[in-house]
Image (tube, helix red, strand yellow):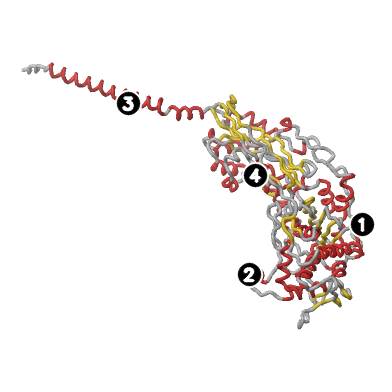
Amino acid sequence: MKQPTPIKNQQQEKHIFRNRIFFAIGLVFVCLLGLVIRYSYLQIYQHDHFNTLSDSNRIRLQALPPARGYIYDRNGILLADNYPVFTAVMSKADIQDIDDVLKRLTPVINLAQEDIDRVKKRAELARKTEVLAIKMNLTEDEIARFSELKQNFPGVRIETQMTRYYPYGDLFAHIIGYVGRINDKELKSLDKNLYAGTNLLGKIGVEKSYEELLHGVPGYESVEADAHSNVLRHLGRKEATRGNDLYLSIDYGLQMVASEQLAGKRGAIVALDPNTGEILALVSSPSFNPNLFVTGISGKDYGALRDNIDQPLYNRAVQGAYPPGSTIKPMEALGGIHYKYIDWNTKISDPGYFHLPGDSHKFRDWKKSGHGIVDIDKAIAMSCDTFFYVLSYQMGIDKMHSWMTQFGFGQKTGVDLPSESTGLYPSPEWKMRTRKKPWLKGETISVSIGQGAFTATPLQLAMATAITANYGLHIKPHVLRETKGSKSYTVLNGADGKINFSGTRNDWERMHAAMVSVINNGTGRGIRSNIYQIAGKTGTAQVVSIAQGKSYNEAALKERQLDHGLFVGFAPADKPSIAIVVVWENGRHGGSAARLAKPVMDYWLIQREKNPIRPTAIQVNGGLMNAGKKPSELPTAGLLPASAPAATPAPSSQDIDE
């Protein structure tokens, strides 16, 4: 039999239903309240933050790199120019996978592996809003290919940027140096705000020494951009401040003449004003084209320069340390006067050699038969080695070191060019420290004629010659003459000290007269002038040693084993306005080096004012119409001087003395 259905409790069911309704309404209310509170918090308290994030998706702050300051010679001739090129850049904020973008971009604009590595390294250190250069100086074909595929590379675009150009190529390479792309090591040490948007940095020469002046201060621009980083609207702008322009003490014409003398040779010429320390010409031969380095030198080109046996990248004038030979004898003789070991009446008998007491080893004079009776004047004019052997034995190495270092030997001159060598003026302390051996008296004899361990740079010899020319006043060589721009900088000219000398001005004047005798009737007689007087000193530095009892056989030596020829001098002798040093590697003798110096002095003292050498045209980059073109393709590129000096004749056999 079917059971009856139980009677429902309607009141209880209504109560349960009502409670469920209230709970659901309460839950919905709580959720809505939480949503309102959160929404209010975001709208009111976080409004500025999210408004900034929103704007960052469409409003960007772009760095405006400053134009680099120009570099001129003392006459206002432009030596370092700026010109525009097309550059592929990427916005880091718009790139999710840099590796993928660079991989796909490689065949489009011909990226090299070094370009890819450089961009990756810089991206690691760059801020999210920074724009990174991918490749500079794009060709027309590369630009065309990218334009067709632009939609595939959001965040990548092509801009015009300024880069460096050196109109005269290798002529000023070792002075001005060059700029190059900033590497990852340099990026870590640079002020990222100051170098925002900048791709180039001074690497060597003036470009490096005065980077702070040349660089300038970047500006900023606020722009509205779309999702592909295309600029839609310019909202605000703060202009960049261009770097200072530098005016160097270098004279274009004098540099041309000096460079011509060393054409096809290895060596250096330095000319400076002995009154101010201004460097008038500085040539290191062979040289190189600095334009190769600006947008990135190829591995092949760099390898050719690096492995060249003649070392064109090596700045011989500032870094080359050579035995100075007899060029230092005037300074050394003044040291003998200072310590009162000799005076102008001192005479010795020169048999053609000298040996230390109790030692049979003979230190030979360059003239086998000797010079007879020799005083200071004759010792300087005829470059008598024996006279200085005797003097150095009397003075000793300690006094010689103390005296000669006052002329700047063995230490940096402080020139405003990087990587300067100290050279070496040896001492007993130096030998014990570096070689763990005591000093020998025979080494003093070798040092006395600029041989042995004694080495000096051409720039050091130029400074020492200038000090001798201006009666012991010490000057500091420098290439910067003046700067113009927003940053202040003081260039110091003139003497900054004086040699501690116990003699009189008359001793300096008599030494000048002895150096004039070198030119008029001594070892430098091949460069006599009827227009002005030259005070000078020749020198020969051995490259290979000669055993005791053997004679120098030039015919048996290879070209790179021949002696170096050196010359130091100043003119006019009575009122010097130029001091000059010539080092001709394997030039055989000082007389040959002197002949290279003569055209340089002639130009400065005779030709410069009446018929100065100037460029035939002024380089014009043509503005943005020339963007992407190489400098050689621009109008008036490859300038030539208005006139070129005649080639230096080969030295005659009559001028091959010391």
Q: Which mark is residue 34?
A: 3
On screen, residue 553 versus residue 64, left or right, reads: right
Secondary structure of the residue carrying tag 4 is helix
Give the quadrant of residue 407.
Answer: bottom right
Q: Residues within 10 Å of mark 2 (few under 14, many from 20)?
A: few
| Amino acid type of the residue tagged 2 in the rendering | Arg
| Amino acid type of the residue tagged 4 in the rendering | Glu
Mark 4 and mark 1: Cα distance apart in space? 45 Å
Q: Quadrant of the C terminus?
A: bottom right
Which residue is found at the position 53% from the left and 34% from the top? 93
In the displayed structure, 358 sits above or below 546; it is below
- The mark lying in front, picked from 3 and 4, is 4
- Is residue 537 visible in this depiction of the protein? no
Give the quadrant of residue 26.
Answer: top left
Most extreme residue toward the bottom is 358
What residue does disc 4 label? 212
Q: Residues within 10 Å of mark 4 (few under 14, many from 20)?
A: some
| Amino acid type of the residue tagged 1 in the rendering | Ser
Mark 4 and mark 2: Cα distance apart in space? 38 Å
Secondary structure of the residue carrying tag 1 is loop
Looking at the picture, tell me which residue is in the foreground, 213 or 433.
Answer: 213
What residue does disc 2 label? 433
Q: Residues within 10 Å of mark 3 (few under 14, many from 20)?
A: few
Q: Which mark is residue 529?
A: 1
Mark 2 and mark 3: Cα distance apart in space? 80 Å
Question: CB atoms at circles 3 and 1 under 8 Å apart?
Answer: no
